[in-house]
């Protein structure tokens, strides 16, 4: 059988965003990598369950975000079909026949799309204020032949001033708009800004909005507002005691909300409540159950959009992790909670076709994403886009439990090299996930399979800080690099004792984001690793605080307060503080437009290492952001994997070319 290579990255197909039409059919997005154009292509597909037919429904190369209007049997979606234009476009087409019609386009970045009624769509986009827009138009008319991007002066008056994946905001904020599909005319739905979600009520006369009221002072507190379209009135519903993280209408007078009170900062698991518009009352349903809401299992071969929650026949359905597993649960307005299904894999999206059938996007550690139906505990696969994987020899993760020194149970896994032979010794690479409040589990990760195919054992685990467990387990705030680091090292110790095939003298470590932070931290606190690759990392919490889109509030909760009030804490928890201790050869991989963890985080650590005479290399990717490993330009993703393999081969494989 074949072994998985770097070039096989281009074979993976992602599916997402299931959108139900009726009890027999639904739409979903298919997304692929295109090497020739160095971009992603996506279009919308339709599934007919009874006829067992899966077929392409739209013909564009950048079609996404399908939204069904069941009343009019129309499909709205976002696209970019004009090759010469960089504008965001909205299309509408009749489901029962006819071509897609472009009804609207804008130079602004459209972030989400929803039907409000049979004749109107609501959308959220990054947009400047009208006054600024007019000034921009005058500049464009004055010199419409000149390329101004290279000489543009960026003026900044507020925070956040950057956004990962967007760049400098230049006064743009998230605004909600109403679009008439007949006239193609758009207008502001409300004068409020910093809107992150909108959902129309079942009767369409109200719109629920999730927004930030004070993005500079309280960027972690999202409020629930309801806009009454008939009265043209906007009203706040929730208090500042809770942050609203998500929402779905139960009926026209009540809304299910996902909440967080940040009792343990960002480690706090979300909980569910229901808000009554008539009584102006919020009823908390699941706070004491401490459920790790949403599925955060890591994968580098997903895409196409997700759907984590929905309301169906007045009940609320949601995805959540249970350790490394994914579960679907249901709750009603009285708080009655039922787990419908739990799988040893990753359910990325859910929707409901009928009372006893779900449509899901599912993967496990041996099978990439496909579309399935789920009924009475049985899954039926509908697509076979990734059937090619059956011809490849893969490594199956083997779970092993670790009892930490304080008695806590930790989930950990090892993947044997694909060419494993009993009695031989193999180099091993530790992978560390980001977040820190994400998790590893039974999802497909190309990078890990690639390393296993190259002759490496691969280790990974869920240390303290990870999602999928209790809020207490996830809480490492003000103690980064302490209990989480200890957990990881105890996993390594357990693995070395239990798996004789691991060569303890040839250990490597890598990770991205929080995993990059931890990689930086590890090499400053131990020399057992002979090679390391740190990706989109943090090296100094102080510089991270003021240069990134989340730094000024993320650091406050994770490190403890603002840096000017906690200088010792920020310094103590920064890997850069311990740079003189580093003996491990370190490769830095970073994107030049990563505004989640900006490139100075890599630069300053790299500079210090070279100044100290240490072995270090830095590879920077232009035009990329924090999503390089899972959403970067295809050729850049290929190059990234190549650099990782070459670095580990150089230091961990005896006799490898240097």
Image (cartoon, grey):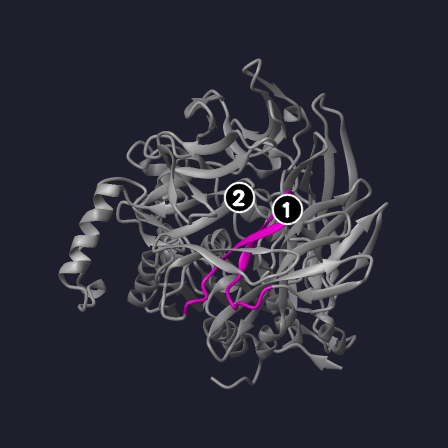
The residue under label 2 is: 114
Answer with the quarter of the image where residue 87 lies. bottom left
| Relative depth, front residue between 452 and 250 | 250
600 over 35 or under it: above or below: above
Name the secondary structure under disc 1. Answer: loop
On the image, the x and y values in percent for residue 512 come to 49, 58
- Is residue 157 toward the left or the right of residue 489 in the image? left
Name the secondary structure under disc 2. Answer: strand
Residue at 48% over, 65% down? 533
Answer with the quarter of the image where residue 201 lies. top right
* Crowd band around label 2 with a 10 angstrom C-alpha radius: few (<14), some (14–19), many (20+): many
Q: CA distance from mark 2 to mark 1?
A: 23 Å
Magenta span: 58-82
Answer with the quarter of the image where residue 278 lies. top right
On the image, the x and y values in percent for residue 624 come to 40, 64
Let me know if residue 582 appears in the view. Answer: yes
| Relative depth, front residue between 371 and 233 | 233
Residue furthest toward the top? 279
- Is residue 303 toward the left or the right of residue 226 in the image? right
On the image, the x and y values in percent for residue 437 come to 55, 44
Q: Which badge, 2 or 1, is on the more N-terminal residue?
A: 2
The residue under label 1 is: 295
On the image, the x and y values in percent for residue 398 come to 75, 60
Residue at 59% over, 30% down? 203
Let me know if residue 492 appears in the view. Answer: no
* Crowd band around label 1 with a 10 angstrom C-alpha radius: few (<14), some (14–19), many (20+): many
Residue furthest toward the left? 142
């Amino acid at each position: 059988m074949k072994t998985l290579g770097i070039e096989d990255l281009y074979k993976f197909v992602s599916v997402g965003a299931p959108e139900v039409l009726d009890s027999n059919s639904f739409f979903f997005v298919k997304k692929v990598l295109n090497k020739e154009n160095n971009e992603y292509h996506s279009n919308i597909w339709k599934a007919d369950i009874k006829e067992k037919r899966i077929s392409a429904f739209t013909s564009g190369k950048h079609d996404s975000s399908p939204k069904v209007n069941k009343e009019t049997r129309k499909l709205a979606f976002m696209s970019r079909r004009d090759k010469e234009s960089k504008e965001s476009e909205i299309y509408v087409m009749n489901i029962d026949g006819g071509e897609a019609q472009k009804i609207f386009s804008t130079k602004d970045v459209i972030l989400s799309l929803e039907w409000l009624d049979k004749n109107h769509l609501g959308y959220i986009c990054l947009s400047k204020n009208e006054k600024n827009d007019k000034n921009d138009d005058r500049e464009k008319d004055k010199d419409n032949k000149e390329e101004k991007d290279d000489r543009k002066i960026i003026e900044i008056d507020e925070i956040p001033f950057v956004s990962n994946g967007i760049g400098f905001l230049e006064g743009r904020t998230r605004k909600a708009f109403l679009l008439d599909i007949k006239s193609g005319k758009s207008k502001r739905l409300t004068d409020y800004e910093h809107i992150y979600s909108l959902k129309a009520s079942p009767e369409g006369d109200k719109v629920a909005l999730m927004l930030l009221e004070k993005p500079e002072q309280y960027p972690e507190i999202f409020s629930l507002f309801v806009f009454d379209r008939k009265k043209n009135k906007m009203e706040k519903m929730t208090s500042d005691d809770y942050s609203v993280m998500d929402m779905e209408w139960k009926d026209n007078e009540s809304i299910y909300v996902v909440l967080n009170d940040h009792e343990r900062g960002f480690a706090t698991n979300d909980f569910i409540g229901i808000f009554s518009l008539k009584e102006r009352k919020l009823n908390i349903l699941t706070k004491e159950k401490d459920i790790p809401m949403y599925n955060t299992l890591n994968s580098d071969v997903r895409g196409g959009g997700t759907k984590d929650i929905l309301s169906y026949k007045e009940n609320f359905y949601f995805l959540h992790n249970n350790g490394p597993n994914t579960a679907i649960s249901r709750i009603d307005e009285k708080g009655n909670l039922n787990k419908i299904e739990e799988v040893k894999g990753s359910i990325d999206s859910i929707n409901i076709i009928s009372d006893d059938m779900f449509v899901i996007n599912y993967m496990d550690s041996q099978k990439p994403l496909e579309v399935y139906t789920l009924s009475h505990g049985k899954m039926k696969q509908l697509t076979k886009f990734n059937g090619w994987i059956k011809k490849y020899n893969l490594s199956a993760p083997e779970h092993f439990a670790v009892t930490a020194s304080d008695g806590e149970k930790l989930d950990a896994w090892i993947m044997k090299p694909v060419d494993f032979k009993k009695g031989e010794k193999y180099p091993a690479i530790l992978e560390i996930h980001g977040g820190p409040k994400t998790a590893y589990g039974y999802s497909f990760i190309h990078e890990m399979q690639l390393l296993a195919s190259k002759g490496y054992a691969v280790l990974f685990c869920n240390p303290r800080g990870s999602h999928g467990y209790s809020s207490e387990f996830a809480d490492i705030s003000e103690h980064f690099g302490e209990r989480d680091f200890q957990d990881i090292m105890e996993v390594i110790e357990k693995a070395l004792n239990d798996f004789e095939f691991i060569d303890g003298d040839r250990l490597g470590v890598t990770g991205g984001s929080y995993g990059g932070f931890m990689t930086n931290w590890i090499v400053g606190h131990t020399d057992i690793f002979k090679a390391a690759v740190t990706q989109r990392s943090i090296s100094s919490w102080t510089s991270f605080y003021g240069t990134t889109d989340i730094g000024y509030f993320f650091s406050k909760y994770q490190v403890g307060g603002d840096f000017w009030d906690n200088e010792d804490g920020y310094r103590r928890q920064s890997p850069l503080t311990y740079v003189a201790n580093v003996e491990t050869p370190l490769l830095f991989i970073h994107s030049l437009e990563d505004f989640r963890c900006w490139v100075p985080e890599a630069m300053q650590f790299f500079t210090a290492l070279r100044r100290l005479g240490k072995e270090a290399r830095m590879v920077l990717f232009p035009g990329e952001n924090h999503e390089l490993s899972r959403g970067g330009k295809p050729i850049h993703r290929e190059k990234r994997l190549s650099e990782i393999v070459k670095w580990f081969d150089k230091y961990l494989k005896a006799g490898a070319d240097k």
